[in-house]
Amino acid sequence: MNGNLGATNLKRRRRQDDPMRLLDTLPPQLRAWLTTAALPWSPRSCARIWYRAQREGLSASQTVARLTRSEARALERDNAHKRVRPPDR
């Protein structure tokens, strides 16, 4: 069941909880961001970033911007990994 994970070389992790149940509990702005995310984010990791930002006093739009920056850094790591990897023969 790896068909919907996208073309990423980033480490995959096993889930301990039900991601769909957790997804249903997320704020609407966060769920909307997840639908447009370039990477297959877990609801748990997004919730962790979201609620930490909310505790810091950030608004919903600032929190979405933080998630977008986190995703950009992850995409940079993924692209750097792809450039370093030797070609398949």
Image (cartoon, rainbow, N blue to C red):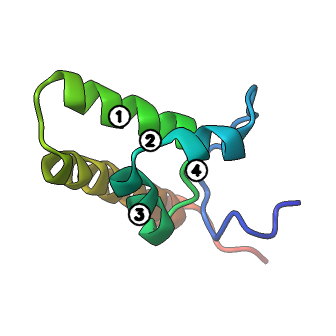
| 30 relative position to 41: left or right | left
* Alpha-carbon span between mark 4 and mark 3: 23 Å
* Alpha-carbon span between mark 4 and mark 1: 18 Å
The reply to whether discs 4 and 1 touch (Cβ–Cβ < 8 Å) is no
Q: Nearer the viewer, residue 67 or 33?
A: 33
- The residue that appears at 53% across and 39% down in the rendered structure is 25
| In this rendering, the label closer to the viewer, 3 or 1 | 3
- The residue that label 4 is drawn on is 10
Dot 4 or dot 1, earlier in sequence: 4
Label 2 is placed on what type of residue?
Cys
Numbered label attached to residue 49: 1
* Alpha-carbon span between mark 3 and mark 1: 15 Å
- The residue that label 3 is drawn on is 32
Label 4 is placed on what type of residue?
Leu
- The residue that label 2 is drawn on is 46
Q: Position of residue 52 (x, y in %)?
A: 28, 25
The reply to whether discs 4 and 3 touch (Cβ–Cβ < 8 Å) is no
Dot 3 or dot 2, earlier in sequence: 3
Q: Tag 1, which secondary structure?
A: helix
Label 1 is placed on what type of residue?
Ile
Q: Tag 3, which secondary structure?
A: helix
